[in-house]
Image (cartoon, helix red, strand yellow):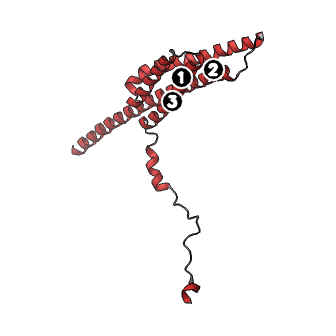
Amino acid sequence: MLTTLVGLIGIVIGAWLNALLTTRRERWNLRRDLYTRLLENLGEAKAAQGSLWDLEVNDRHSDIESVVNYRKNRIEELSKRDDDAVQSIRRATSIAAIMLSNEALHTLNGLQFEWSKAKNENTYFNYLDTRTAATAKAYQLLVDAAKKDLRMESHLWLRAFTKPPPRNCGPGPAPPESGAAAS
């Protein structure tokens, strides 16, 4: 009888721990997926904004109709890529409020603020520059937040045990001068 009771208690505790660990793992997976989606879209926005900047600054402007059409089509394509990525980031930011760290939320809110501020720039170049800089900064800050939040760097404490000892590459201490001491 006592053995059965102990066995049942063990089963209940095991089931409870399993449920607890499964829930924790599922939440971690959801956070990871959300960070992945945000970082992919930030990367896409950053690439599209950088290409737009490059197209405006480095591409030769011409009055030839085929070149004008190419530029127009390319700008439309890059603008659409940027818009799609921005919309995905905004949708994911809504979900982020319940899943991600305060650091990540602060980064995403700061990005939205900087993007809104870019609309007030005097020139298209300043607009692109402000948006591109804000996106690049948010990308790096979100990478850092994700590493902390997902504990991707938690294994770094092992480096203290696995680091090879430093090699002595210098000449070392000078040998004692036996001839000078003997005279």
Q: Which quarter of the rendered picture does the C terminus lie within?
A: bottom right
Residue 68: percent from the left, percent from the top?
A: 73, 12
Instruction: Give whichever of discs 2 and 1 has the lower sequence position.
Output: 2
- Report the residue marked by disc 2: 52
Front one among 56 and 94 = 56
Q: Quadrant of residue 85?
A: top right
For the residues labelled 1 and 3, the Cα–Cα distance comes to 11 Å
Outermost residue to the left: 2
Amino acid, disc 2: Leu
Amino acid, disc 3: Lys
Residue 161: percent from the left, percent from the top?
A: 46, 56
For the residues labelled 2 and 3, the Cα–Cα distance comes to 18 Å
Q: Who's the residue at 68% across and 16% down the image?
A: 74
Vertically, is 181 above or below 105? below
Q: Who's the residue at 39% across and 23% down the image?
A: 97
Q: Residues within 10 Å of mark 1 (few under 14, many from 20)?
A: some
Residue 81: percent from the left, percent from the top?
A: 60, 18
For the residues labelled 2 and 1, the Cα–Cα distance comes to 13 Å
Q: Are marks 2 and 3 in contact (CB under 8 Å)?
A: no
Q: Who's the residue at 40% across and 31% down the image?
A: 103
Q: Quadrant of residue 43?
A: top right
Residue 137, numbered label: 3
Instruction: Give whichever of discs 1 and 3 has the lower sequence position.
Output: 1
Front one among 21 and 46 = 46
Residue 45: percent from the left, percent from the top?
A: 56, 22
